[in-house]
Image: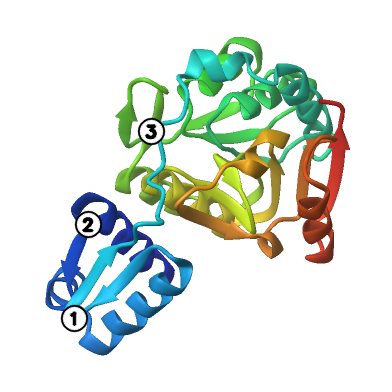
């Protein structure tokens, strides 16, 4: 709960630039001591700067630009995405229940799932659900929620609540808008949905193209230690690969 609250506080500072401690107490129904601890944590991250009575958005905080349109992302690094999908497929077995993150990388995984039998597949991505419904006989659960029309995905409170209907998920296949010390996302609602997938899943597999290691994001989905497998391109930074392995994450590199 603390982490979710701090993520929401970050978003408030992006929207409003300056907020008082009293306002945060009222908004989140928390004590002034809790507000001060949250602000101290956010100041340590470099997101905000504390001032008398509250805090302001840090001058050094880069507010994320919108990600590229879906049609453009679909063709970027496509060979690498196809190679990553082939590796991820090896970790998906018949009769599993899996959660598929939204995005063009995971779409390449979906295209290969006709090679498996009797899967239960949970996704918030209409592109992925459509691909699976055309080409497989798997049971597909399309997560409801607020529709992002440009990307054709669902997000928001209802999307996160939808996952409470499942007792557990065998594996979540995730991607990232950016990656530093873990998976990051530009959108606070997608951060919450990915985190919910992770919480329900026995295993977490991430397919991250090598360019994502250089993209900073404001919302952290999870740390490295919450990942079981990262598949990425051979051009990924050596230092990042080393950190992943030191955190106990299995890393598989594919041609870019």
Task: Quote the CA–CA distance across marks 3 and 1.
Answer: 39 Å
Tags 1 and 2 touching, CB below 8 Å? no
Residue lying furthest bottom: 33
Q: Using residue 118 as the reference point, say whether residue 5 is left or right of it.
A: left
- Decide which of tag 1 and tag 2 comes sooner along the chain: 2
Quadrant in which the N terminus appears: bottom left
Pinpoint residue 189: horizontal percent, then vertical percent. Answer: 37, 46
| Tag 1 secondary structure | loop
Res. 172 in view: yes
**Residue at the spot of label 1:** 52
User: What is the number of the mark on residue 154?
Assistant: 3
Pinpoint residue 107: horizontal percent, then vertical percent. Answer: 62, 23
Pinpoint residue 34: horizontal percent, then vertical percent. Answer: 30, 84
Tags 2 and 3 touching, CB below 8 Å? no
Residue lying furthest top: 134
Task: Quote the CA–CA distance across marks 2 and 3.
Answer: 28 Å
Pinpoint residue 147: horizontal percent, then vertical percent. Answer: 32, 29
Res. 98 in view: no
Please tell me how crowded label 3 is: few (under 14), some (14-19), or many (20+) other residues with Cα within 10 Å.
Answer: many
As displayed, is residue 182 above or below residue 106? below
Quadrant in which the C terminus appears: top right
* Quarter of image, res 152: top left
Residue located 25% across and 65% down the image: 56
**Residue at the spot of label 2:** 17
| Tag 2 secondary structure | loop
Which residue is nearer to you in this view: 140 or 47?
A: 47
| Tag 3 secondary structure | strand
As displayed, is residue 85 above or below residue 205? above
């Amino acid at each position: 709960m603390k982490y979710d609250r701090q993520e929401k506080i970050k978003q408030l500072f992006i929207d409003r630039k300056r907020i008082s401690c009293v306002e945060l107490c009222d908004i989140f129904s928390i004590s002034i001591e809790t507000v001060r601890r949250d602000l101290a944590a956010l100041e340590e991250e470099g997101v905000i700067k504390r001032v008398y009575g509250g805090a302001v958005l840090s001058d050094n905080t880069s507010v994320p630009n919108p990600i590229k349109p879906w049609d453009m992302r679909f063709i970027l690094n496509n060979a690498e995405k196809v190679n990553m999908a082939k590796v991820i497929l090896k970790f998906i077995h018949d009769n599993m229940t899996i959660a598929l993150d939204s995005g063009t990388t995971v779409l390449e995984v979906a295209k290969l799932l006709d090679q498996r039998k009797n899967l239960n597949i949970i996704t918030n991505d209409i592109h992925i659900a459509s691909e699976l419904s055309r080409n497989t006989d798997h049971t597909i659960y399309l997560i409801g929620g607020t529709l992002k029309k440009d990307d054709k995905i669902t997000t928001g409170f209802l999307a996160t609540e939808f996952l409470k209907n499942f007792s557990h998920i065998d594996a979540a296949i995730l991607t990232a808008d950016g990656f530093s010390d873990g998976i990051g996302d530009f959108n606070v609602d997608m951060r919450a949905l990915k985190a919910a997938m992770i919480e329900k899943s026995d295993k977490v597999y991430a397919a991250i193209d090598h360019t994502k290691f250089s993209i900073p994001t404001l919302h952290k989905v999870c740390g490295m230690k919450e990942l079981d497998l990262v598949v990425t391109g051979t051009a990924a930074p050596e230092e990042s690969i080393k950190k992943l392995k030191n955190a106990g994450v299995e890393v598989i590199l594919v041609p870019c």
